[in-house]
Amino acid sequence: MDIIFKIMLAGHISVGICALFLFWFPAYSKKGSPRHKKFGNWYTLSMYGVVITGMAMALLSIAIPEWVKPEAFVDSVNKAEVREGIVRFALLLFHLSLLTLVSVRYGKLVLKAKLDQQSIKGPFQLFITFVLLVSGALILWFGIVTGHILMLVFGPLGLFISITNLHFTFKRHIKKTDWLVEHLGGYIGSGIAAYTAFIAFGGRHIFTSTGFMQIMFWVAPGLVGVIFISVLSRKYTNETKG
């Protein structure tokens, strides 16, 4: 079973790296152009790969941690503590995968919705958004109880994305350019999650800084993402008015 898990992990990392690179191509392509659509679809597919492999690994780790990571239990005195650590990480991985799924699907669906929110009121999208809302609250609570810094980062991010998505979904009066801001927010939100996860789980072995600097590495994608959304929203809003 650990071999299957390692294959999944290799696939997860591979499609994740592809997504990190592909993220920038539609962002800097002309809105609505064939290049924008092509790279946007490739990015979406790669993120779906991240979601599928991430959720599969998370569920396996929760259900059978001893089979998934047998080496962690070999010389362990307190196997219950090891199991708890693996399950806690798996819950965070599942939350991140769900966050990514909600953001990417929302960003794609909102293109169809524009001034009519019916496209984003489908049962599946509403279901996973409400699940993300609950997941964000639970992850935040676990973070507060355990002092786990990544849970304190990703819990609120999940809450923010689910609440803002639901706000637009059931908003009565929307402006002509609101859908564009939501589209950008959905895709950039998924990018924030991807880059934060890379830095938190993989990049921390490259960036060996500790303490305040490491926290800054985790927070930086979110700050850059918010600025990016703001700049592109103004740009495309002005283009629409022109």
Image: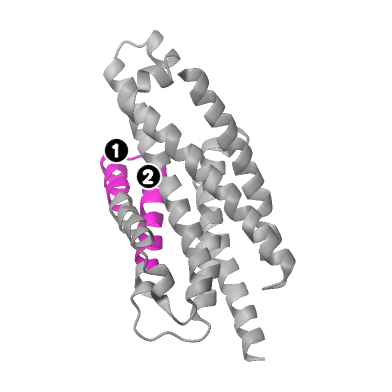
Kindly indicate the quadrant of the structure image that contains residue 180: bottom right
Magenta residue check for 204:
no
Q: Quadrant of residue 145?
A: top left
Overall secondary structure of the magenta section = helix
In contact (CB < 8 Å): disc 2 and disc 1 = yes
Residue at 31%, 49% in the rendered image? 135
Would residue 8 be found to the left or right of residue 95 on screen? Answer: right
Q: Who comes first in sequence, dot 2 or dot 1?
A: 1
137 and 3: which one is in front?
Answer: 3
- Residue sitting at 37 percent across and 65 percent down? 122
Report if residue 163 lies within the magenta region: yes
The residues colored magenta run: 137-165
Question: What amino acid does circle 2 point to?
Answer: Met
Residue at 60% x, 67% y: name it.
228
Judging by the rendered image, the residue that carries numbered circle 2 is 151
Task: List x then y, in percent, for residue 113.
Answer: 47, 75
The mark closer to the camera, 2 or 1, is 2
At mark 2, the secondary structure is helix
- Identity of the residue drawn at 31% across and 53% down: 131
Horizontal and vertical percent for residue 78?
29, 14
- The quadrant of the image that shows the C terminus is bottom right
